[in-house]
Image (spheres, helix red, strand yellow):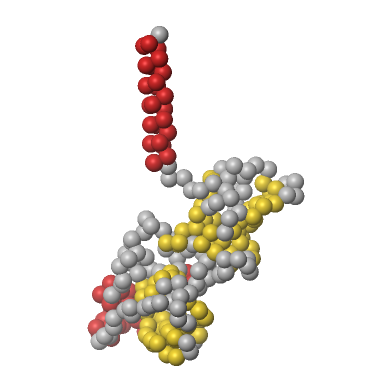
Amino acid sequence: MKQLTRFFIVAVVIIIASAFTGQAQNTNPPVLPAFSALIKTGKIQLDFISGFRDVAQIGVQRSLDSAQYFYTIGYVNNPNDYRNSYSDNKPLPGSNYYRLLVTFNSGRYLYTKIMLAVPDSTIDAGQKLQLADVKEQMVAAAAKQSAGGATPTVAETKEAEKKVEKIVWHPSNYVYTTADGNINIKLPDAAGKKYEVKFFEPDGSFLFEIKEVKEPFLILEKAIFLHSGWFNFEIYESGKPYEKWNLFIPLNYKN
């Protein structure tokens, strides 16, 4: 009887230890009504596990504000799958907040929690790209432009190399490209000051602006800019010029 009792105790200990080990190694996404929203390379990916069945559709809603102005940007392809995901390939400039609208075949519906998109910790994007990191792609872009979009000749490529060699450029400390191709905005005391950032094409055409940067650190996904190459930006503090510079978004990433 004693042996049976000791065996039972040991078995329970093994089961409990196995359960904790399983939890430690669990890499599954959160379960609805919670989900994850991770900033990847050029997109924001939402992942979740659903225990719901008889689901008619799951709508993905986005907002730049955490409390209001949510609107539907798309739907999950297979709403009744146990494990699911959705990719926002055209995120907005600024902080992107998401929530899911789960609608059942019965007509009932529910909203999930509101989640802020955060950087994916598995992507090492801390390295600020320098001129040497993007020089090769700058040559290719300049040569293609000289060729009018066609395949550049050897002479056009050599001419582009000469032009790029003459460029003296260094990245800004406030708005810069990182190794994953995304743009980081890092402004001192952003919560206490009123910063505004505007982005332009190289020819001066206006792209978009962030009227008020509220966070000290903000990531803009590459997809917002629609293409690779040079872009100009202007930073204003309380309406006064703070910095005017440019950045280069590579076609390929270092990660």
Q: Count up the numbered dots.
A: 0
Residue at figure coordinates x 28%, y 72% from the top left: 133
Answer left or right for 222 relative to 48.
Answer: left
The x, y position of residue 94, in whole percent, is 50, 72
Residue furthest top as drawn: 1
Q: Nearer the viewer, residue 224 or 116?
A: 116
Answer left or right for 251 relative to 48.
Answer: left
Answer left or right for 227 relative to 101.
Answer: left
Residue at figure coordinates x 52%, y 56% from the top left: 46
Residue at figure coordinates x 38%, y 26% from the top left: 14
Using the image, determine if residue 4 lies above or below residue 241: above
Residue furthest right as drawn: 107
Quarter holding residue 120: bottom left
The x, y position of residue 189, in whole percent, is 40, 77
Q: Is residue 83 visible?
A: yes
The x, y position of residue 48, in whole percent, is 53, 49
Residue furthest front as drawn: 2
Q: Quadrant of the N terminus?
A: top left
Using the image, determine if residue 150 lies above or below residue 103: below
Residue at figure coordinates x 70%, y 48% from the top left: 104
Q: Nearer the viewer, residue 13 or 37?
A: 13
Q: Quadrant of the C terminus?
A: bottom left
Q: Nearer the viewer, residue 131 or 148?
A: 131
Quarter holding residue 80: top right
The x, y position of residue 88, in whole percent, is 53, 62
Q: Is residue 199 visible?
A: no
